[in-house]
């Protein structure tokens, strides 16, 4: 019996340890309940964001490869993420509202359109890089009621207090605050530094510099809701703990995200959730390390800030010619997963070119196998054993804290065996079937050979519906061009009533059937 233990570094215990689902699925297999923090959709997600999303994708793929079921939730933040949310004391301008004021934001009628546009772009990039669609992709703006209720509970049980400007979590009331990051020294958590200049007013009603916003009172905010605490919007930290528990339960198996989220975001999530339930929020925590580009931190000023679109789009559509665009999206995926998630990663043009060549090698093998299956040649099978060993080694590497370098080496060993055999003599139908099975399983595990379609961007199952939707989208495009925003919103409502979700992408508007 092979060992199907899935070992993963746990940031809570600081050790690599078995990931153990606490529930079973209907068929009796382990059920992994996994929440991974998604992006704030105020702009295009960059390749560093997608390295984190790919880590989550590989966790899902590995779990499924060993026979587990996965309930995978990844959110979309479309309100509440403040510009200073990387400090213990969250204040500043909402990133969504700030983006609308930017040069890029001028094309949008309102912040809701901006959020929809970048959410659509996210989903297009997600599919381009062959990431599995989450079981649920909740949006913060669709769960404000649940967030308000959580604030009410925290106020009632003494873990929160209200000021003239908002509602704050009372950090001293939760002694375990900072247990994930280790940031427990109050002197180190005082907001800002002496040299830090800020043009915002900090809430003087706050009791402790570590206290963070659960609700911000602001009846002038572009996105606001009525609550018992007044008109305003929820804090960024609140949304993830609320949505994770709504869809996965009070204690979840695994929570993931980028290393920048460990503090304060994940520490705040833990405090909120556990103050409400008095139960552990997540038993296992995983974080992906930062990505650099050519040895430097990504920066628009340095010209090395890269999005998926920059690398995969044609030059005439905005692709970066200096980076060799358009790059095969699977080559980009291969490059981004080539380094271990738990170590800093340097993304380079040289490595991207190597990845592109390797993807072509996988494609050559895939084509050779397909041709050999169609030819149905007689002969023996001397590929089943080496390919079986190569896949077993790849899966074992992934079960060992997502060791992608070793897993990719094993996969490459297998594809070399296929191509070497094919060069010597045509594959028999038996050998071709073994090779086909290997490629299929490697693709399921690593997602680097061919795209898998988990969701359709366009549904053409109903030609009449497709014709109606295309006509409405055309009318909406005309309305937006003439700045008739009211008519554009009316058409969106008509499309929503048809069960259609539209996505405004840089290349135009596309749609899918939600039903």
Image: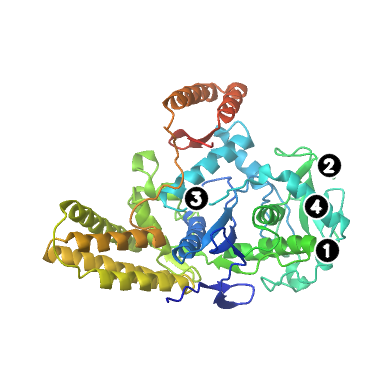
In front here: 361 or 178? 361
Residue corresponding to mark 1: 208
Q: Which mark is residue 133?
A: 3
Do we see residue 490 in this rendering?
Answer: yes
Q: Residue furthest front?
A: 27
Q: In the shown orientation, is residue 424 left or right of residue 298?
A: left
Q: Which mark is residue 230?
A: 2
Query: Which residue is pictured at 61% across the width and 23% down the height?
Result: 490
- The image's colour scheme reads rainbow
Q: Earlier in the sequence, mark 1 or mark 2?
A: 1
Cα separation, mark 1 vs mark 2, equals: 22 Å
Q: Earlier in the sequence, mark 3 or mark 2?
A: 3
Give x and y (percent) for residue 294. 41, 63
The secondary structure type at the circle numbered 4 is: helix
Q: Earlier in the sequence, mark 1 or mark 3?
A: 3
Residue corresponding to mark 4: 151
Q: Of the residues tagged 3 and 2, which is closer to the observer?
A: 3
Give x and y (percent) for residue 52. 51, 60
Q: Residue furthest bottom?
A: 15
Cα separation, mark 3 vs mark 2, equals: 36 Å
Q: Of the residues tagged 4 and 3, which is closer to the observer?
A: 3
Crowd around label 3: few <14 · some 14–19 · many ≥20 (10 Å): some
- Quadrant where the N terminus sits is bottom left
Q: Of the residues tagged 1 and 4, which is closer to the observer?
A: 4
In front here: 394 or 180? 394
Q: Of the residues tagged 4 and 2, which is closer to the observer?
A: 4
Q: Is residue 379 above or below residue 319?
A: below
Give x and y (percent) for residue 228. 85, 43
Cα separation, mark 1 vs mark 3, equals: 40 Å
Crowd around label 1: few <14 · some 14–19 · many ≥20 (10 Å): some
Q: Quick check: marks 4 and 2 in contact, CB under 8 Å? A: no
């Amino acid at each position: 019996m092979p060992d199907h233990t899935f070992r993963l570094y746990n940031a809570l215990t600081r050790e690599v340890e078995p990931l153990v689902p606490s529930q079973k699925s209907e068929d009796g297999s382990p059920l992994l309940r996994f929440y991974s923090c998604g992006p704030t959709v105020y702009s295009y997600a960059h390749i560093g964001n997608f390295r984190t999303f790919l880590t989550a994708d590989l966790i899902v793929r590995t779990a499924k490869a060993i026979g587990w079921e996965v309930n995978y939730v990844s959110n979309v933040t479309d309100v509440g993420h403040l510009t200073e949310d990387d400090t213990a004391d969250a204040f500043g301008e909402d990133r969504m509202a700030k983006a609308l004021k930017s040069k890029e934001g001028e094309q949008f009628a309102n912040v809701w359109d901006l959020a929809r546009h970048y959410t659509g772009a996210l989903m297009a990039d997600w599919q381009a890089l062959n990431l599995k669609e989450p079981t649920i992709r909740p949006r913060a703006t669709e769960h404000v009621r649940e967030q308000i209720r959580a604030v009410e509970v925290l106020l009632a049980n003494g873990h929160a207090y209200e000021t003239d400007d908002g509602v704050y979590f009372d950090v001293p009331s939760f002694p375990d605050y900072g247990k994930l990051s280790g940031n427990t020294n109050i002197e180190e958590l005082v907001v800002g530094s002496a040299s830090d200049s800020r043009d915002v007013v900090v809430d003087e009603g706050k009791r402790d510099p570590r206290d963070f916003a659960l609700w911000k009172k602001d009846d002038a905010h572009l996105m606001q809701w009525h609550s018992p605490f007044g008109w305003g919007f929820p804090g960024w930290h609140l949304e993830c703990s609320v949505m994770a528990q709504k869809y996965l339960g009070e204690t979840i198996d695994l929570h993931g995200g980028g290393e920048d989220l460990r503090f304060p975001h994940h520490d705040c999530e833990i405090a909120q959730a556990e103050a409400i339930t008095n139960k552990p929020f997540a038993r296992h925590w995983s974080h992906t390390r930062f990505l650099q580009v050519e040895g430097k931190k990504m920066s628009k000023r340095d010209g090395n800030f890269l999005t998926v679109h920059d690398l995969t789009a044609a030059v005439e559509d905005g692709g970066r010619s200096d980076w060799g665009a358009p790059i095969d999206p699977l080559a980009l995926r291969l490059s981004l997963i080539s380094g271990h998630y738990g170590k800093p990663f340097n993304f380079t043009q040289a490595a991207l070119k190597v990845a592109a060549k390797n993807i072509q090698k996988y494609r050559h093998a895939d084509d050779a196998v397909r041709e050999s299956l169609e030819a149905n040649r007689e002969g023996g099978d001397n590929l089943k054993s080496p390919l079986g060993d190569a896949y077993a080694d790849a899966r074992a590497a992934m079960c060992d804290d997502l060791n992608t370098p070793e897993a990719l080496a094993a996969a490459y060993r297998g594809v070399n065996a296929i191509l070497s055999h094919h060069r010597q003599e045509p594959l028999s139908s038996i050998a071709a079937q073994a090779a086909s099975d290997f490629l299929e399983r490697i693709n399921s595990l690593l997602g680097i050979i061919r795209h898998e379609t988990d969701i359709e961007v366009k549904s053409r199952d109903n030609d009449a519906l497709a014709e109606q939707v295309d006509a409405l989208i055309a009318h909406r495009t005309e309305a937006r061009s003439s700045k008739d925003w009211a008519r554009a919103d009316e058409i969106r409502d008509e499309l929503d009533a048809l069960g259609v979700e539209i996505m405004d992408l840089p290349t135009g508007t596309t749609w899918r059937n939600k039903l």
